[in-house]
Amino acid sequence: MRCPYCGHNDSKVIDSRDVNEAVRRRRECLGCGSRFTTYERPQATALLVIKKDGRREEFSREKLIAGIRKACAKRPVSQETIEQTVDDIEAQLHKLGKGEVATSIIGDMVIERLRQLDGIAYIRFASVYRAFADIEEVREEADAYTRLKLLRNSTNQLPLFPNEELDTMCRGVAKRAASNYRREEDEQKKRISVSPSQ
């Protein structure tokens, strides 16, 4: 195993642990003494990702980690949690039993996990993934997230609706509220522009 710091080819294993469907090994370089971590995973069959424009490319774990890491920048989400999240998504993709999967499926899996991990990371990722047109759409999404969080945390009882249905309902409420707010704002502007003498 080549050392990422000095390039030396020899290292010794200090610690080994099973992590989900992988083996995590802490290694020490015999050249410079630096320590680093490696993961060993069974090689699954190649999975192709269908892009929005119809192109196909091989699934890249590294790209997925980079995207989630970018969303979680300066947030209290550890690298280990990000790796665990990607492990879960990758395992779920292989369980689908398909050779090809659309980017939208992967994006939805990421959004669902980020929603549970960290609100800011979730909004960051959602704003890029869902290509929000303006700040109003970002606010609607943030309002829906806040309502959903409050509903989930407000009681220890079993939920009346499944999380996905509750999420859709909250998003609908946020959009209606924003629409009503804009309508009221327009009506108020009309009232102000009409002079009292008329």
Image (cartoon, rainbow, N blue to C red):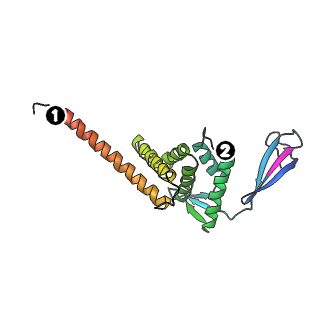
Q: Is residue 42 left or right of residue 119?
A: right
**Residue 27 colored magenta?**
yes
- The foreground one among 5 and 158 is 158
- Across and down, in percent, residue 191 comes to 19, 36
- Across and down, in percent, residue 31 comes to 89, 40
Question: Magenta region: which residues?
Answer: 25-30
State which quadrant residue 60 falls in.
Answer: bottom right
Query: Which element is circle 1 on?
Result: loop
Which residue sits at x=19%, y=33%? 193
Query: Which element is circle 2 on?
Result: loop
**Residue 68 seen in the figure:** yes
Which residue sits at x=64%, y=64%? 94
Tag of residue 78: 2
Q: Give the mark, 2 or 1, whose residue is nearer the N terminus.
A: 2
- Position of the C terminus by quadrant: top left
Q: Is residue 61 left or right of residue 181?
A: right
Which residue was labeled with disc 1? 194
